[in-house]
Amino acid sequence: MTEEQYHLFWNRYFSSGFDEEREKYFNPKDFPAQGSITSYFMAADAVVTTAAYECPVHQQLALDGADFYAYVFDHHSEDSPDKMVAHSCELNYLFNPDGSNDQDLSLQMRKWWTNFAIYENPNGESGQTWPKASL
């Protein structure tokens, strides 16, 4: 992604009225390029991640109600050419554990997800190792 494409992307979704926010929170200078992926792409990725995932989590946490658990998966596959962590790449550790490059992580993730399905808490009845999300 080029600088021009980044500005077109930003203005398409947020208009030009948020230039100050773009410079403060999503300045490409603050997002190092990774391999062939430009800093502009990394900044745009942060924009989408924030809008699609982080903002809804914060909105849910602001409501009174049930416990809430969230995670950020940042373990990249050693054979990834750009060492990037792509959306949904954690699913390989859950549903194809033999194909993952970290068997211990795969086992722990399957335990957390199974516990959440059974107990509505990734820790199950074992105690608190995965904290509840908070603001």
Image: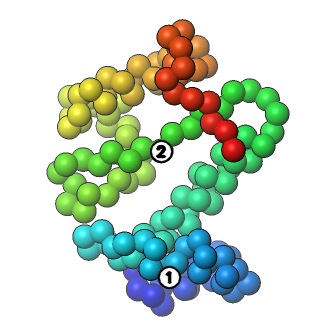
Residue 59 shown left or right of residue 97 in the figure: right
Q: Which residue is mark 1?
A: 6
Q: Is label 1 or label 2 in front?
A: 2
Mark sitting on residue 72: 2
The extreme right residue here reads: 64
Dot 2 amino acid type: Val
Residue 38: percent from left, percent from top: 35, 77
Residue 102: percent from left, percent from top: 23, 34
Q: Badge 2: how crowded within 10 Å, few (<14), some, or many (20+)? A: few
Residue at position x 78%, y 43% in the image: 62
The extreme top residue here reads: 125
Q: Would you say residue 49 is visible in this rendering? A: yes
Residue 99: percent from left, percent from top: 21, 34
Residue 84 shown left or right of residue 112 in the figure: left
Q: Would you say residue 95 is visible in this rendering? A: no
Position of 4 relative to 86 (above/below): below
